[in-house]
Amino acid sequence: MSSEIATLGGGCFWCLEAVFEKVKGVSRVVSGYTGGHVPNPTYEAVCEKTTGHAEVVQITFDPTAVSYQQLLEVFFAIHDPTTLNRQGADVGPQYRSAIYLHTDAQKQTAAEVIAALNMSVFGGKIVTELTPLDVFYPAEDYHQGFYRNNPMQGYCMAVVSPKVAKFRKQFAGLLGG
């Protein structure tokens, strides 16, 4: 199996992780932080909005099972890429919409997907950053698999579960094990 890595930020990493864990061809999803200026940030520091980091997920996937473009299509369907530094009630730069690029090919694909969605769905209002990945810092252990381990937690029931349900309905063909 060949593998590639995608790093995406679109609000709370619990939401993204919960969805991407269910995508066929995805072998690993790690919640973490990137895009800031403080080495080894903690969740508390990121929430204080002083590190410059975004909450992100790093996705390891098999491109023969799911393409990078398909991952981006899921990404844009499960968050609002038109709001700057905000996803619903989650407000702050740590919740920004961002694609952290690993290769030139990812940059090209991301730009093409954004251009197409701007034309057809979002009316030219996508604010998603396209930024080369610098350093990825895994989040604390208790954030990993948060939804899977805490499905009855209030935020998970109110915010994460509807995103997972939307993914299941809209992308049934990408549903994995």
Image (cartoon, rainbow, N blue to C red):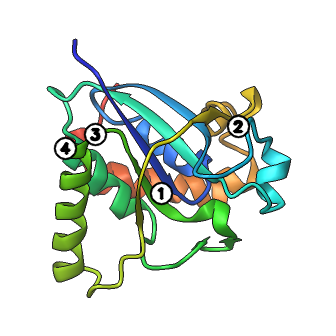
Viewer-nearest of discs 2 and 3: 3
Task: Identify residue for label 1.
Answer: 163
Q: Which amino acid does label 3 sit on?
A: Thr
Q: What residue type is labelled 4?
A: Ala
Q: What residue type is labelled 2?
A: Asn
State which tag comes first along the sequence, 2 or 4: 4
Q: Residue at x 28, y 21 (%)?
A: 3
- Alpha carbon separation for disc pair 1 and 4: 28 Å
Question: Would you call the spot at circle 1 few (<14 residues within 10 Å), some (14-19), or many (20 or more)?
Answer: some
Q: In which quarter of the image is the N terminus?
A: top left
Q: Which amino acid does label 1 sit on?
A: Lys
What is the quadrant of residue 113 in the picture?
Answer: bottom left
Question: In this view of the protein, which residue sits in the foreground, 163 or 43?
Answer: 43
- Alpha carbon separation for disc pair 2 and 1: 15 Å
What is the quadrant of residue 77 in the picture?
Answer: bottom left
Question: In this view of the protein, which residue sits in the foreground, 62 or 38?
Answer: 38
Task: Identify residue for label 2.
Answer: 150
Q: Are marks 3 and 4 in contact (CB under 8 Å)?
A: yes
Q: Which mark is residue 105?
A: 4
Task: Identify residue for label 3.
Answer: 103
Asked if residue 170 is positioned above or below residue 127 in the image, the reply reads: above
